[in-house]
């Protein structure tokens, strides 16, 4: 994938704000329930997603059980829905005049799909159908081979790349200068963790995930995802979306579609994405959606960044007052 040559423009001085949207792993039973109960705009998002998918998926977000919510096919549309509900509730609370204007938007893996809705590229209903199918296809690919992922802290990427070559694993997420995630067959990931520990990694953590995301083990999902991407109506983005695959902005529908299909098997360059945004003039980040994972990453990448979390009625009320 290549970002458009004219896409690399610094953020407008009029807005030094970026909206960030979380990815899989931020889910928790009960997420979004208070928003649903307190905000008509948020409730409309949940209702629209349930209608688009033909199933009361929001019931799983609100009530669980946890093992159902953790399934990729449910967690992905769940996190996206709650993130969009947070965004709409914030717009409702602040009004058009006071709503922060983002110069750039970005999302971590799944969060990139939420960013597409925020940038006007996809409707909520189409994004829900796309993300649900993405989750189904990723689970399908994961079921074909037992894959795993592990976070490696405190190791130079050059040393980790050597371990990946030795163990047939891949670097799948470069989250910060101090945290990189690897993916591959479960046994290979376990071996890579052993080598990383032996060669000086500060810490290694096996991730609780369904498969080896953002690696070649996801290739069986690519064709199906490309088909649904081609079946949907995409609009030109109103705000540039900073791409996971390159850390550079996407400004055309063609680039966006390529990003989505290739992203299943490509490393998420989150560190590059945040660094691009700060170098472009972004000083304030709004993490919109469940959890605070991205806030922690941004702080480790750019200590001077200002970060605001929008995750529930309380955080929205604080901004409104």
Image (cartoon, grey):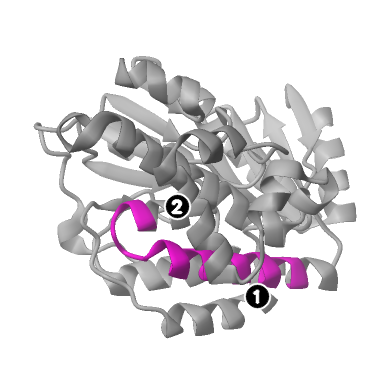
Query: Does residue 285 appear left or right of residue 61 in this picture?
Result: left
Residue at 15% across / 47% down in the picture? 9
Give the residue pinned by disc 1. 221
| On screen, residue 150 above or below 313 | below
Can residue 139 be seen? yes
Counting from the top left corner in percent of width and height, residue 137 is at 68, 72
| On screen, residue 206 above or below 302 | below
Residue at 58% across / 47% down in the picture? 79
Query: Does residue 321 appear left or right of residue 262 in this picture?
Result: left
Q: Which residues are magenta?
A: 117-140
Residue at 53% across / 44% down in the picture? 82
Q: Secondary structure at mark 2?
A: helix
Tag 2: Cα neighbours inside 10 Å, few (<14), some, or many (≥20)? some
Q: Nearer the viewer, residue 62 or 38?
A: 38
Can residue 302 be seen? no
In the image, is residue 176 part of the stretch drawn in magenta? Answer: no
Q: Secondary structure at mark 1?
A: helix
Residue at 60% across / 82% down in the picture? 224
> Closer to the N terminus: mark 2 or mark 1?
2
Q: Residue furthest right?
A: 187
Query: Does residue 218 appear left or right of residue 285 in this picture?
Result: right
Q: Quadrant of the C terminus?
A: top left
Q: Quadrant of the N terminus?
A: bottom left
Say if mark 2 contacts mark 1, CB within 8 Å.
no
Q: Quadrant of residue 251?
A: bottom left
Tag 1: Cα neighbours inside 10 Å, few (<14), some, or many (≥20)? many
Give the residue pinned by disc 2. 44
Question: What secondary structure characterizes most of the magenta part?
Answer: helix
Q: Nearer the viewer, residue 3 or 239?
A: 239
């Amino acid at each position: 994938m290549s970002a458009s040559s004219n896409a690399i423009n610094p953020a407008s001085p009029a807005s030094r704000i970026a909206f960030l949207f979380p990815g899989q792993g931020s889910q928790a039973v009960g997420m979004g329930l208070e928003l649903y109960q307190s905000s008509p705009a948020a409730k409309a998002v949940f209702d629209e997603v349930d209608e688009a998918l033909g199933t009361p998926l929001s019931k799983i977000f609100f009530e669980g059980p946890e093992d159902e919510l953790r399934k990729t096919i449910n967690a992905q549309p769940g996190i996206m829905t709650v993130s969009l509900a947070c965004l709409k509730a914030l717009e409702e609370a602040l009004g058009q005049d006071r709503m922060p204007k983002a110069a750039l938007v970005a999302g971590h893996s799944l969060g990139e799909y939420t960013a597409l809705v925020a940038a006007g590229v996809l409707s909520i209903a189409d994004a829900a159908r796309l993300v649900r199918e993405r989750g189904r296809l990723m689970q399908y690919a994961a079921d074909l081979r037992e894959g795993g992922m592990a976070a490696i802290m405190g190791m130079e990427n050059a040393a980790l790349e050597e371990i990946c070559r030795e163990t047939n694993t891949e670097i799948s997420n470069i989250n910060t200068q101090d945290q990189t995630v690897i993916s591959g067959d479960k046994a290979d990931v376990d071996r890579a963790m052993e080598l990383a520990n032996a060669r000086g990694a500060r810490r290694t953590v096996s991730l609780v995930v369904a498969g080896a995301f953002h690696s070649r083990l996801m290739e069986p999902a690519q064709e199906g995802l490309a088909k649904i991407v081609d079946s949907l109506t995409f609009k030109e983005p109103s705000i540039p979306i900073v791409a996971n695959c390159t850390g550079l902005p996407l400004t055309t529908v063609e680039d966006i579609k390529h990003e989505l299909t290739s992203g299943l098997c490509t490393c998420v360059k989150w560190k590059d994405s945040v660094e691009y945004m700060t170098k472009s003039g972004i000083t304030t980040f709004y993490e919109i959606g469940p959890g605070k994972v991205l806030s922690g990453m941004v702080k480790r990448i750019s200590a001077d960044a200002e970060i605001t979390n929008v995750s529930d009625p309380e955080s929205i009320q604080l901004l409104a007052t």
